[in-house]
């Protein structure tokens, strides 16, 4: 898939940002309800990629996303599915538990997606850009040059600064790593909203997204948690013989393994996220 970029123009009002739906239809339905209750239009809702993934309803999830009309970039899973690849392209270590599990859920998703769904994913851009509160904002999945690179809060500052430079951005909204965080770097802001398809390894079934707002010309952002019918998502994974280790994560909130995590992030396993309930307002000048 060639690199494609989409410019959304200048957005005003609330913007809802989320990642990794992972074929979790129940989580997507809950998030859509949140958007509607807060009067956030579909064109102000943005996904950082991986609409398809570990859970049991890939086709239904893509079709709901398509009907909703929210924006999304292509995650590595979309890229691989469009290209007809044999694996998810998640950059897991060969022979690892995650690599083994991907050999189960990926072909399952591949076998259940319609041509219409594949065509929709083929049209997704690799990057999205827009202006917000006078700032240049870019949306990426992993890293600019490697869609499958895991970028965590403790990952190299230099790598993040290179991405700001390459994208000519002051704010980056990124996905892929599965953990929510925000980090100010050299008067720039990196936000990972987390994902809605799987918990954040914090010992709760909650999943995460971010809300952006304009407050008197300044950028305000809030990490918000989402509760949804995870028991139904669990039962669907179980009945479709998908990896039970991932299904149980929906309930326990704990990852089956932490092979992709840096040591600092591993040490936080099972500790519920306690983001400040008040929005954080910053002025990037």
Image: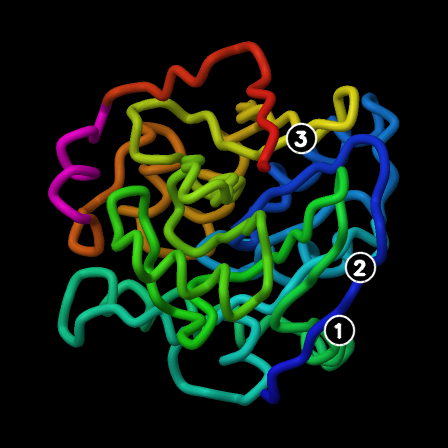
Residue 159 vs 235, above or below: the answer is below
Say what secondary structure mark 2 lies in: helix
Taking the spot 51% from the left edge, 32% from the top edge, the residue there is: 208
Foreground pick, 143 / 257: 143
Foreground pick, 168 / 65: 168
Residue identified by numbered label 3:
219
Count of marks overlaid on the render: 3
Residue identified by numbered label 2:
66
Taking the spot 53% from the left edge, 24% from the top edge, the residue there is: 225
Please indicate whether residue 128 sits to the left or right of residue 278 in the image.
right
Start-end of magenta stretch:
262-270
Q: Position of residue 25 (x, y in %)?
A: 63, 45
Please report contact status of discs 2 and 1: CB closer than 8 Å, yes or no: yes
Q: Is residue 86 magenta?
A: no
Could you tell me how far apart the alpha carbons at marks 1 and 3 are, in whole angstroms?
A: 32 Å
Q: Residues within 10 Å of mark 2 (few under 14, many from 20)?
A: some
Q: Earlier in the sequence, mark 1 or mark 3?
A: 1
Residue identified by numbered label 1:
120
Identify the disc placed on residue 245: none
Q: Earlier in the sequence, mark 3 or mark 2?
A: 2
Could you tell me how far apart the alpha carbons at marks 3 and 2 are, in whole angstroms?
A: 29 Å
Q: Earlier in the sequence, mark 2 or mark 1?
A: 2
Say what secondary structure mark 1 lies in: helix
Q: Position of residue 147 (x, y in %)?
A: 44, 71
Residue 33 vs 150, above or below: the answer is above
Taking the spot 43% from the left edge, 56% from the top edge, the residue there is: 176
Q: Residues within 10 Å of mark 1 (few under 14, many from 20)?
A: some
Say what secondary structure mark 3 lies in: strand
Please indicate whether residue 25 sits to the left or right of residue 145 in the image.
right
């Amino acid at each position: 898939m060639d690199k494609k970029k989409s410019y959304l123009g200048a957005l005003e009002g609330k913007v809802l940002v989320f990642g990794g739906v992972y074929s979790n239809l129940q989580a997507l339905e809950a998030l859509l309800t949140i958007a509607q209750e807060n009067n956030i239009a579909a064109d102000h809702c943005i996904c950082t990629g991986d609409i398809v993934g570990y859970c049991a309803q890939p086709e239904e999830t893509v079709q709901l996303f398509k009907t909703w009309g929210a924006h999304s970039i292509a995650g590595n899973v979309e890229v691989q599915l469009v290209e007809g690849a044999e694996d998810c392209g998640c950059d897991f270590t060969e022979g690892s538990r995650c690599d083994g599990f991907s050999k189960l859920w990926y072909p399952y998703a591949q076998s259940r997606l319609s041509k219409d769904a594949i065509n929709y994913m083929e049209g997704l851009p690799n990057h999205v850009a827009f202006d917000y509160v006078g700032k240049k904002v870019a949306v990426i999945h992993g890293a600019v040059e490697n869609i499958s690179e895991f970028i965590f809060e403790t990952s190299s500052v230099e790598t993040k600064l290179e991405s700001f430079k390459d994208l000519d951005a002051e704010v980056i909204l990124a996905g892929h790593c599965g953990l929510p965080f925000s980090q100010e770097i050299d008067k720039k802001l990196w936000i990972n909203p987390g994902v809605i398809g799987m918990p954040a390894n914090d010992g709760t079934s909650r999943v995460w997204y971010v809300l952006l707002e304009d407050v008197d010309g300044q950028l305000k952002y809030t990490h918000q948690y989402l509760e949804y019918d995870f028991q139904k998502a669990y039962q669907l994974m179980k009945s479709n013989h998908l990896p039970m280790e991932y299904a149980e994560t929906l309930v326990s909130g704990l990852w089956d393994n932490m092979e992709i995590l840096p040591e600092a992030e591993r040490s936080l396993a099972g500790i519920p996220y306690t983001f400040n309930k008040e929005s954080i307002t910053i002025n990037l000048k």
